[in-house]
Structures are given as C-alpha cells and as structure tokens.
Image (spheres, grey):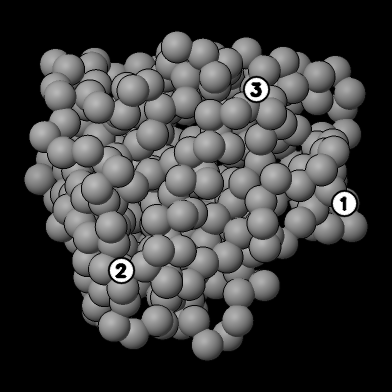
C-alpha cells in the first residue's frame, strides 16, 4: 500500500482532514441488495493456531446495558475459546462487570473508549506476544485459518487489515444487508477513501509498530479507525477543513499525524468478516454526533485522565449530551 511522505505541512493536513470529513459525512452508505447467507454462522469453527505468537485483544464498554452487544461479544469470545486462541479483554463497567477474565475498570465515564482502551490493554498483554490484533467484539471470520494467515502476514507488514470483504448481517444473522471491501484494497485501486470500502472492525500490528504508530485516541464518540488509517497512510485531498463538523479533534489529530515520522507497511489478508447486528446503522449518526462538541476548540481541553488512565469529560453539559447520544443508538432495537 503506497503512502504519502511523512512530512506533512499544516496546509496538507487541512486538506487531508477534509477528506476524512468527506468520508465521515457519508453517514449511512447505500445498502447492497439483501442476500441470504449460504451457510449458518453456527457452523464457523476456527482452526487452532500452529504458533501462538499473536494476542487477540478485545475492549468492552456497554453504557446502555445492551443485551445484544453482550450476547454478540460472548458468542465471538466462545469461538476464540473453542480454537484455543489467546485473547485478552479490558472492560469498563459502572455497576458490575459482565465479562469473565477481563482487566476491569470501574467508571461512570460514558465515551467511545475504544482506542484509549486498546492503549491501556496493550500494557497488560504478556511480552511473549509479539503481534497484536485489536478486534471488535461483534465480528466473525469466514476464513477459518485467519489467525495463522494474519500472523504470517505480520512477518512482512507492520499493520494488517485482517479481511478482504466486510459483511453486515441482519438481526437474524441469516442475511447479508451490506458489503464493503477493506480500505487497504480499495485505496490501492482508487487512491481515495469513500463509498465501497470499510476502515474498521479489526486492525493487527507487529507489537513494536503498535507502540510506534497506534490509534488516534481522541475520537470520543467514534470514527477513530477512519482518522487512524488516514494518519498512517498520510493521504491528502483537495477538500478543505471548513467542511468539517469535527474541528474539535483537529489540534490533537495534527499532533498524531506529526508523530508519524515514517510510514508503516500496510496490507490485508484474504477472507470475509461478518458483523453481528446490534441496532440500525442510521442510529449511529456518524456525522451529526460531532455537533455535541461544536463549541469546543480542542477536545483535550475537556478531557482528563482518571487514576486508571481512562478519559473523562470535565464539562457536565457535554458529558450529559454524550450519554444521551449513546442511549439513542438503541443497540437492542430492530
């Protein structure tokens, strides 16, 4: 995957962030024709790894107490256990924990904690694991040999998207309602990022490369995958920052981009990934959710780290709006 030079001027950055805004503004990509799956997801059984040098890392936070989010996670975790795949979980909970054998943080902070939790979890994973894959807790692999294929790819590449095609299942888990190819393949063909590609679900790293590049941690209502991949590849565009509804992220993102002084080698592996349903995509409000922070200049000004390292919002009014946003997602809805 070719990338731009690591030396990014402020002007270039403004153009790059404009492209990210264009991507995020595509709130709900057009759905593909609904297709029945030609297999039952219950029949998925991963192959046992030949060499366990890669840790699967999960983060779990569920402020709305969604039953579907929890059930999806437990199912995904069970698939790992059946194949004896090494996995580690960090969990944020406010009342009582829900996940067995997790690193636990008790907190009332309601944010999209994903990238920050990845950072905190890496510190807990034993040093013997030289590769890491951060996996959303609601996806299954169609490639039963994904673990070994991914580990082998990380022998060559720094960062790997562990699938070729992403599929979104309906609430019955029997129909495919949307399909996109990995951003890595899409970008290699089009030199752009937009409709037709997906940036999330999972990313794998050589461990030293995760510590060198990592994720952008300040997307506190989501979209961290989008900004992270754009930072890694140094992609630029002709769009301008004035189009962006998430300017509050810009100062921190400039620092993130400037911290990347060399470009990682990025690839993907063959195979499909399947997303387990938890509420309508339209309820995520991928673009207008940023309006919660319309009067914020720098997101870091309203965040503080608690004793666990987790972020908390210091502005009570904004914190309440963020809580309402996550509640409105209705992850148990149809």
Is residue 157 visible in this depiction of the protein? Answer: no
- The residue that label 2 is drawn on is 147
On screen, residue 284 versus residue 167, left or right, reads right
> Who comes first in sequence, dot 1 or dot 2?
2
Residue 177 lies, in percent from the top left, at: 24, 21
Residue 229 lies, in percent from the top left, at: 39, 50
* 55 over 252 or under it: above or below: below
Q: Residue placed at 60% from the left, 69% from the top?
A: 122
Image quadrant in which you'd find residue 331: top right
Is residue 241 visible in this depiction of the protein? Answer: yes
Q: Residue placed at 22% from the left, 38% from the top?
A: 40
Question: Which of 303 and 98 lies nearest the eye of the viewer?
Answer: 98
* 241 over 253 or under it: above or below: above
> Who comes first in sequence, dot 3 or dot 1?
1
Question: Which of 36 and 194 lies nearest the eye of the viewer?
Answer: 36
On screen, residue 121 versus residue 110, left or right, reads left
Give the alpha-carbon distance from disc 1 to disc 2, as whole Å.
35 Å
- Label at residue 134: none
Residue 100 lies, in percent from the top left, at: 67, 57
Q: Nearer the viewer, mark 3 or mark 1?
A: 3
- The residue that label 3 is drawn on is 326
Q: Secondary structure at mark 1?
A: loop
Give the alpha-carbon distance from disc 3 to disc 1, as whole Å.
21 Å
- The residue that label 1 is drawn on is 306
Question: Which of 302 and 124 lies nearest the eye of the viewer?
Answer: 124
Q: Secondary structure at mark 2?
A: helix
Question: Quadrant where the N terminus lies?
Answer: bottom left
Q: Residue placed at 47% from the left, 26% from the top?
A: 278
Give the alpha-carbon distance from disc 3 to disc 2, as whole Å.
32 Å
Question: Which of 98 and 15 lies nearest the eye of the viewer?
Answer: 98
């Amino acid at each position: 995957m070719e990338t731009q030079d690591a030396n990014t001027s402020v002007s270039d950055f403004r153009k790059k962030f404009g492209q990210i805004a264009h991507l995020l503004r595509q709130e709900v990509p057009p759905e593909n024709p609904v297709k029945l799956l030609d297999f039952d997801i219950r029949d998925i059984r991963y192959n046992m790894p030949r060499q366990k040098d890669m840790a699967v890392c999960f983060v779990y936070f569920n402020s709305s107490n969604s039953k579907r989010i929890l059930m999806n996670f437990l199912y995904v975790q069970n698939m790992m256990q059946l194949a004896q795949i090494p996995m580690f979980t960090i969990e944020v909970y406010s009342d009582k924990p829900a996940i067995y054998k997790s690193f636990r943080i008790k907190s009332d902070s309601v944010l999209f904690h994903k990238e920050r939790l990845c950072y905190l979890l890496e510190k807990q994973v034993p040093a013997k694991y030289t590769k890491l894959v951060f996996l959303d807790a609601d996806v299954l692999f169609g490639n039963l040999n994904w673990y070994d294929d991914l580990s082998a790819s990380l022998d060559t590449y720094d960062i790997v998207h562990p699938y070729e095609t992403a599929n979104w299942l309906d609430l019955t888990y029997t129909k495919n309602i949307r399909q996109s190819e990995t951003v890595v393949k899409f970008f290699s063909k089009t030199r752009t990022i937009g409709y037709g590609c997906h940036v999330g679900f999972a990313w794998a790293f050589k461990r030293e490369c995760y510590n060198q590049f990592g994720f952008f941690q300040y997307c506190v209502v989501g979209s961290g995958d989008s900004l992270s991949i754009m930072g890694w590849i140094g992609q630029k565009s002709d769009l301008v920052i004035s189009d962006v509804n998430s300017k509050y992220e810009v100062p921190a993102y400039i620092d993130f981009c400037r911290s990347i002084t060399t470009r990682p080698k990025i690839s993907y592996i063959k195979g499909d990934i399947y997303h387990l349903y938890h509420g309508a995509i339209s309820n995520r409000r991928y673009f207008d959710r940023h309006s919660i922070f319309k009067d914020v200049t720098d997101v870091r000004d309203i965040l503080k780290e608690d004793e666990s390292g987790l972020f908390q919002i210091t502005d009570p009014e904004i914190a309440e709006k963020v809580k309402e946003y996550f509640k409105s997602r209705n992850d148990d809805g149809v």
